[in-house]
Amino acid sequence: MDEKEILIKTALLFKTYGIKSMTMDEIARQLGISKKTLYQFVNNKNDLVSKMMSLHIGQEQYCIDEVYKETNNAIDELMETTKLVSTQVKEMHPSVMFDLKKYHPEAFHLLRDHKDRFIYKNIKRNLETGIKEGLYRDNLNPELVTRLYLSMVHSIMDPENFSNKAFSYADLHLEMMRYHIRGIASSKGREYLKQKFKQENV
């Protein structure tokens, strides 16, 4: 088992059981390797979580870049990105964000920095593209709306805001995206959305 496989399988364990509850002994046991083998790849649990987060961020950036290449317009791009993120966070253990923020701040800041830089760049570009296509309102301010969007993302990421287990991260992200798209769409965009939502059953 190589380092990448260890990180991918560990990420699945964290997603299922939370991070704090998984000790290095239990991780090694679940992976079917010795703890000595595990420590050949990481220094400690903090190192493991940080490396896992770096891998996750790299994979997410690659997938979002592919969505951009393959979609036809700004609205399609947003909707396909929403599907991608919803799939990633579906059935994620509700304690994951809390565990990251409290026990692994380095990894949490890696994730937040990813949102502040990569997601910022993509949302702003998407807004500018949508305005040119006539699908978004021509009177919106891309810089301001991007910052408002990021504030919603950070709000969802903060476990203190959504500690109620009745809200899954997938539901929160989907509702946030619906709110965002409907707020920025032009009349042409809203008409396109109606057809898109009907096709996608969103």
Image (cartoon, helix red, strand yellow):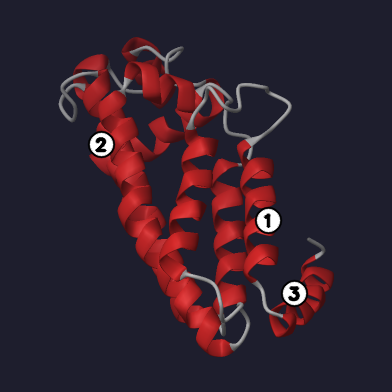
- For the residue marked with disc 2, what is the amino acid? Lys
Residues under labels 3 and 1: Cα distance?
12 Å
Is 171 or 149 nearer to us in this picture? 149
- Residue 74: % across, % down: 55, 77
Residues under labels 3 and 2: Cα distance?
39 Å
Judged by depth in the image, the label closer to the viewer, 3 or 2, is 3
Residue, disc 3: 193
**Tag 3's secondary structure?**
helix
Quarter location, residue 121: bottom left
Is 106 displayed left or right of 9 in the figure? Answer: left
Total marks drawn? 3
Is 197 displayed left or right of 173 in the figure? Answer: right
Image disc number at residue 6: none
- Residue at image location 53% in from the left, 82% down from the top: 131
Q: Residues within 10 Å of mark 2 (few under 14, many from 20)?
A: some
**Tag 2's secondary structure?**
helix
- Residue 45: % across, % down: 27, 19
Residues under labels 1 and 2: Cα distance?
33 Å
Is 122 or 28 nearer to us in this picture? 122
Q: Residue furthest bottom?
A: 133
Residue, disc 2: 51
Is 147 or 89 nearer to us in this picture? 147
**Tag 1's secondary structure?**
helix
Q: Earlier in the sequence, mark 3 or mark 2?
A: 2
Quadrant where the C terminus lies?
bottom right
Instruction: Please say if the residues under marks 1 and 2 sit with CB atoms less than 8 Å apart.
Output: no
Judged by depth in the image, the label closer to the viewer, 3 or 1, is 1
- For the residue marked with disc 1, what is the amino acid? Tyr
- Residue at image location 66% in from the left, 73% down from the top: 185
Look at the picture and state if 94 lies above or below 77: above
